[in-house]
Image (spheres, rainbow, N blue to C red):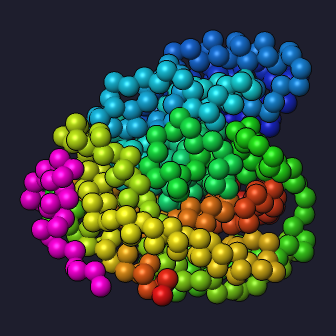
Amino acid sequence: MTDPADLSLTEAAIALRAGTLTSRALTSAVLARIAARNPRLAAFTHIAADALAQADRADSMLHGDAPGPLCGIPVAVKDLIDVAGQPATCGSRVLADRIADADAAAIARLRAQGAVLIGKVATYEFAMVGPDLTLPDPPARNPWNPAHITGGSSSGSASAVAGGLVRLAIGTDTGGSIRSPAAYTGCVGLKPTYDRVSRAGAFPLSPGLDHTGPLAITVEEAALALDAMTVGDWRPASARIGQPVTGLKIAYARDWFADDPQATPALIRALDEAASTLSLLGARITLVTLPPYAPYEAAASVILHAEALDEHRALIRDHSGDYGRPTLQCLAFGAALDADDVTQAREAQTRLTADMLTTMDGHDLILTATTLTPALPFAAFDGEKAVWTPMRTIAFNLTGQPALSLPAGFENGMPLGLQLIARHGDEDLLCRTGHAFERATDHSVQRPSL
Amino acid sequence: MKKPFTENDFRARLAALGLTLDDKAFAAAWAGAQHLRAEVAKVEAYLK
């Protein structure tokens, strides 16, 4: 018999509705899985004391009117997002004793639909930079090889999902913090359209670039989770899952990664094979030249560092000694900026977004890489200063377009990811295409042996 | 035309923030600050 902890979200939802599984049994299985694997992965930093009580509440909700797909499903939450009664430390000594007194808005929606908020998972300190081995919580480890990083900042979310501790975790993404750890750990990461999911109750890194979204094993699970958190009149991300991709026009932005010497040959091969697979599925693939990446990265960096320093100004004054060194140094970068710099960067943001949408004319989606390499080993990080890993993600925090990272292959046993990008609000198209690709390949069904 | 942003300018801004960094941390922060100024120049070049 399948361990309930290994059931997909949809399999578990069917069993919960049929009465062949209870949320208490599912949650108990997940708690046992966490107890068995977390010592090796350090994904979870806190387990909810009331997890089984939440499960019992979900079991009673399952007998009510039309319970949602997440009713009774255990969900992990990045320790940057408030969950009432649980620690909310942002992975930092600065907030070491903080307990959230209310749910973040997105989490409140999950709780109202009966999700079991099973615990908090690791984050890079204030979502800024990592891994930092000097912080109180050990860094989350990559389930494919615990000597390697997960990427971040949603490090625990990725480790927990890829390691099979939970099927679903919530993360945040300001420059790629959902998508890059998803790519590095072989799971799915979905950064929605800007403002589709409320950011209230998530500690801001850069309010103009911050997004909240799910990490999951499959595209369908991520889409269902996004729908559960969505506020307002958006087409459901899960609405077109299972529909064919015949005739979809995909712009293949190969130059954004293949022309960069940091991109590994295996990554380039994996992306070319992905384009070929999508073509065989009936999509029309066209090589396109996107606007140069550098101005996107530059404008986003200026906005991010200026806003991050603003958010931390008061905390730095009173607690500078409690920050990790790399985080404090990165926050200090922002002191090099003035108001005119930020005004210009925001003006560039508007024009760069228009440029990107113009380039998409005649296309439904963009296909490119998420990261340019597999996950680095911890040995590449000395803990003194920030080390940046090459990726192609922050452009879509700047434009606010939805972007999906999903598994695309392996290099020396470590996962690689591809990225699909849509127009604002087209998460349904994104998830339809991601799901079709997932079904046509075996990348997503391969799991690490733990 | 803006005058160049100097190490002394950066030190003054950190002091205004109440932020004291040891020499090693300051060197890393100053390198990052210079990188960020280069990013500002890229934004300006794009907008021209």
Q: Which residue is at a point 64% across and 54% down the rendered structure image?
A: A194
Q: Nearer the viewer, residue A176 or B20?
A: B20
Q: Nearer the viewer, residue A228 or A53?
A: A228
x and y percent of residue B41 in the render? 37, 80
x and y percent of residue A66 in the render? 89, 25
Q: Measured along the vertical axis of the image, is residue A365 above or below residue A102?
A: below
In the image, taking residue A95 as reference, residue A227 lies left or right, namely: right
Q: Nearer the viewer, residue A187 or A366?
A: A366
x and y percent of residue B26 in the render? 15, 60
Count every numbered label the image shows and give the total.
0
Q: Is residue B20 magenta?
A: yes
Q: Is residue B28 visible?
A: no
Q: Measured along the vertical axis of the image, is residue A170 above or below residue A178?
A: above
Q: Nearer the viewer, residue A294 or A154?
A: A294
Which contiguous range is marked in magenta?
A: B1-24
Q: Measured along the vertical axis of the image, is residue A94 above or below residue A421?
A: above
Q: Quadrant of residue A338?
A: bottom left
x and y percent of residue A94 in the render? 29, 35
Q: Which residue is at a point 67% across and 25% down the rendered structure image?
A: A111
Q: Which residue is at a point 89% across and 20% down the rendered structure image?
A: A65
Q: Is residue A274 visible?
A: yes
Q: Is residue A129 magenta?
A: no
Q: Which residue is at a point 49% across and 21% down the rendered structure image?
A: A101
